[in-house]
Amino acid sequence: MIRHSLPRPLALGAAVLALALSAVFSTAFVQAAPAARPNVILVITDDQGYGDVGAHGNTMIQTPNLDKLYAESVRLTDFHVDPTCSPTRSALMSGRYSTRTGVWHTIMGRSMMSPDEVTLGETFQSGGYRTGMFGKWHLGDNFPCRAQDQGFDEAFRHGGGGVGQGPDYWGNDYFDDTYFRNGKPEKVTGYCTDVWFADALRFIQENRDRPFFVYLSTNAPHGPYLVADEYWKPYAEKGVPPTMAHFYGMITNIDENLGELVSKLDAWGLAENTILVFMTDNGTAAGAGRRRKEPGTWNGFNAGMRGAKGSEYDGGHRVPLFIRWPGGGIGGGRDVDQLAAHVDVLPTLAELCGLARPDGPPLDGKSLAPLLQGDASDWPERTLFVHSQRIPYPEKWRKCSVMTERWRLINGKELYDIQADPGQKRDVAGDHPDVAAKLTGAYEGWWTSLSEVFDEFVYLGIGSEAEPVTRLVAHDWHPPDQSQSPWNQGHIREPKGPIETANGWWAIEVTRPGKYQFELRRWPDHVDESIEATAARLKIADVDLSQPVPPGATKATFTVPLQPGKTRLQTWLTLPDRRQRGAYFVYIRRVE
């Protein structure tokens, strides 16, 4: 539902935020001490496509600060990510193809990155950097998958893949929400994007005398498309359809915040020795093509590409990446046209900062430092891969692109000369069977290397001192299929169709022996409402217990002795009409 009026006092965005920040940081406008290693700020937005930037030719959207950063940066013009959120983020964090990390979906237990991966956070942390992440994580909401478990000294974020999804704090709606600071809920005032940037600036101000790494990951402009009127109405008045107008408005708000961030770096004397990276996580979600029956005269802009978010065509995965480091010779408005991808970011930043990556699985990415520094003399021809699975188990050739600088092999069938045909309109597989065969062979080898993990699961730990109370949410069930995945709060409020009787299991690792208390709930524990069940059942390891539920009860509690190890947990609630579904929330404590 589109919100047309948001009359909240601090929902005015970066303009109001700037006034508040000027007071908070009034004593901080001093020259920062020189750092031996550069600071790094990585800004990644959610669902903003290549064409959703003014500097890329979009004549409608207003992004003056992004456009200025574009002019001052080295731009990767052929940079690719996965077509959806979690896969891109896992590849970005690990320097490895997302499927290797256990991530190939955004829900259903397949959005959690294996704790065996060595992350950007861990790489910078081991190198003496202070590390902070702000906004969207979407790689696991429980130990050992949380940002604070994966190398970040501070983590301030929403839950799940977006504000208002199942793992997020109940009732969040982008304004005056409750987010999680290192796992603990914290009430805030203001619009989500403003909050992430403000907290990142606070972190930078507190750590400006030592090297820092900031991962600033906005949930905007991901839907639902909620933003204050001042941002979206000007677009609607110019003929932009309502949904796209809100989407553009969210990006304009991001742009204002980015401008404030750059201004503070300049004022604090940090700009010269700070590597500032801007990128997005997949193709556009709402910036290309109007929704049916929506009024307006503007049809969006996708830079001539085919496809959008989720697509195997370039419009689904070719995204902007700008990188600026004035003191390190990176800046000044220059394009790098060589093929690159999300897996390259970790090795690139590690090399630029002189960091040794801790021991871990081998990287898929390659450092782009020579290209960024203007040396392409020995750069090899590369073949890279992206795909979109979004199912419980990957399927070969599903929604995939095999890429070289000239060619795109799509789904193992279609071949496009991307240099001659950037819009991917003419399939030339029949004209170049040798090229198709070569790329097919490359994909076969890649697929074989991925297949080792298809039957593995990422296990959520219970009983750890790092997370004394584990809150499991149906978003992370392993259900039979996506129709039984209640991944957002709307599904839980009013379950309809298959979700009314949905169920699934969680992959669990018991970290310590002891007695564990399980609370099965229909609502989160701070919502004092009925469980709406007559009986409850819990099954974990070799334990299978059932009990009646009294009328009006808010929970069903089981106490179970468990030994360490990996297992499965599943629950059942019997409804008054005798149908069954799983408990949407389960709270787990080790009691002795």
Image (cartoon, rainbow, N blue to C red):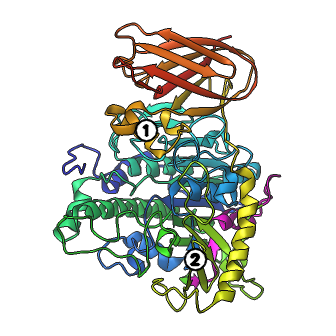
Camera-side residue: 580 or 197? 580
* Residue 219: x %, y % from top left: 44, 52
* Residue 460: x %, y % from top left: 64, 34
Residue located 67% across and 41% down the image: 458
Amino acid under label 1? Answer: Pro
* Residue 24, magenta (yes or no): no
Residue located 50% across and 44% down the image: 481
* Residue 540: x %, y % from top left: 64, 22
Q: Quadrant of residue 291?
A: bottom left
Camera-side residue: 187 or 510? 510
Mark 1 element type: loop
Distance Cα–Cα, label 2 vs label 1: 34 Å
Residue interval drawn in magenta: 335-362
Mark 2 element type: loop
Disc 2 or 1, which lies upstream in sequence?
A: 2
The quadrant of the picture occupied by the C terminus is: top right
Residue that numbered label 1 is attached to? 486
Taking the image as shown, residue 75 lies to the left or right of residue 307, namely right
* Residue 352, magenta (yes or no): yes
Residue located 24% across and 43% down the image: 8
Camera-side residue: 446 or 315? 446
Q: Residue furthest right?
A: 359
- 387 to 181, vertically: above or below: below
Camera-side residue: 458 or 152? 458
Specify the label residue 342 is tagged with.
none
Amino acid under label 2? Answer: Lys
Residue that numbered label 2 is attached to? 413
Q: Nearer the viewer, mark 2 or mark 1?
A: 2
Taking the image as shown, residue 512 lies to the left or right of residue 274, namely right
Crowding around mark 1 (Cα neighbors within 10 Å: few <14, some 14 to 19, many 20+) is many
